[in-house]
Image (cartoon, rainbow, N blue to C red):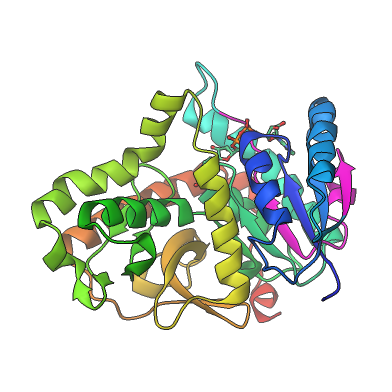
Amino acid sequence: MRSPVRVAVTGAAGSIGRALLSRLGSGAMLGPDQPVILQLIELPTAMDQLRGVAMELEDCAFPLVHEITLHSDPATGFQDTDYAILIGARPRTKGMERSDLMRINAEIFSVQGRQINDHANPNVRVLVVGNPCNTNALIASRNAPDLHPTQFTAMSRLDHNRMAGILASRTGTNASDIRKLAVWGNHSATMVPDITHGNIFGQPLTELVDQQWYQNEFVGRIQQRGAEIIQMCGQSSSLSAASAALDHMNSWVNGTHGDDYVSMVVPSDGSYGISKGIMFSFPVRCRFGRYQIVQGLPLKPWLVDMIKRTEEELLTEREMVRDLLPAETEARHEN
Ligand code: NAI
């Protein structure tokens, strides 16, 4: 058995946090041989709920869980952590403007970025789930000047998995047989679900599904899936979001399969002409604990137009929080 690694989770008493912790404890993120120390972080007002979650985890008696610590102070919560999963965020409430939501969360994530910078393992890998996750990840990253930007990512894997699930139902196959799907851009209604390079056992998806259905129905369905689930269940997707967060980390740490790829929100390096530095969902392959943006995929003109729109939305979001983004230094990229 390996020595335990530390996993910090914010918003650990929330819906996604609870769903994630039980599967994390049974090895779904890092595999069945990797013990973990769970460092659970919550708002001071939610510490009683967090104690309840910790009691339940204790009652699960997971062999992989070596220790559980509870924190209302992120400085101690992120101490020496190897992985940080940032789920806790302020939800949008009635009457709140999108710009207000953006600013409230910007402040939360700038503080958390600094705390991770000062207290986490210098090789920490960070996943931001809390929305607006692309811009929250940008803020956290820019407030962590001693860490490399590539250590920060955000989650578009839920949208990727939704594509696989719906395509599996449509074609009567298993989701795991569907290869080379991609989500481009923002985790928002402007995201771009791309099946044009996908295949099932080598047969192109564009031959297996009707183009009209893809463009006129499927794209909108993926973009609106979160809203549809809220309408049905009265709360946002938590089981599938937790599962996607575990998949994201698992792919990052343990690698993607063969020449297949997954979608991750990562800092743009200018690939596909996307503005450098913004956090953008790309298709990536992972090997040896690192990810690489898949290069050279030809894109249909209508997809390029959609990708431009989602990029513009991210640039607008960045403008809204510009004063919370410390200047980027060259040295940071050379670490
Ligand atoms: P929830 O409201 O059930 O739980 C959120 C938890 O975070 C609460 O327990 C709250 O006390 C805690 N929290 C809030 N601010 C915090 C802070 N500064 N530090 C530590 N903890 C804090 O919400 P749920 O359903 O778990 O969703 C969490 C976030 O994930 C939301 O922002 C939601 O929009 C986002 N989300 C993202 C998805 C994605 O694909 N990227 C998919 C689904 C949800």
On the picture, is 229 further left or further right than 22?
A: left
Q: Nearer the viewer, residue 26 or 202?
A: 26
Residue plotted at (68% across, 73% down): 332
What is the total number of numbered labels drawn onto the structure image? 0
Q: Is 83 a magenta residue?
A: yes
Q: Quick check: 159 above or below 64?
A: above
On the picture, is 37 further left or further right than 261?
A: right
Q: Quick check: 236 above or below 1?
A: above
Q: Quick check: 58 above or below 63?
A: above
User: Looking at the picture, how far across and down is residue 234, in whole percent?
Assistant: 47, 23
On the picture, is 303 further left or further right than 236?
A: left
Residue plotted at (69% across, 62% down): 27
Q: Nearer the viewer, residue 102 or 26?
A: 26
Residue plotted at (34% across, 61% down): 174
User: Looking at the picture, how far across and down is residue 61, in whole percent?
Assistant: 82, 50
Q: Nearer the viewer, residue 271 or 298?
A: 298
Task: Give the quadrant of the C terminus.
Answer: bottom right
User: Looking at the picture, how far across and down is residue 83, in whole percent?
Assistant: 73, 62
The answer to which quarter of the image holds residue 118 is: bottom right
| Residue 66 visible in rendering | yes
Task: Give the quadrant of the N terminus.
Answer: bottom right
Residue plotted at (26% across, 76% down): 201
Ligand 1 position by quadrant: top right
**Magenta stretch bounds:** 67-91
Q: Is 57 a magenta residue?
A: no
| Residue 132 visible in rendering | no
Q: Residue extending furthest top?
A: 95
User: Looking at the picture, how far across and down is residue 85, in whole percent?
Assistant: 68, 53
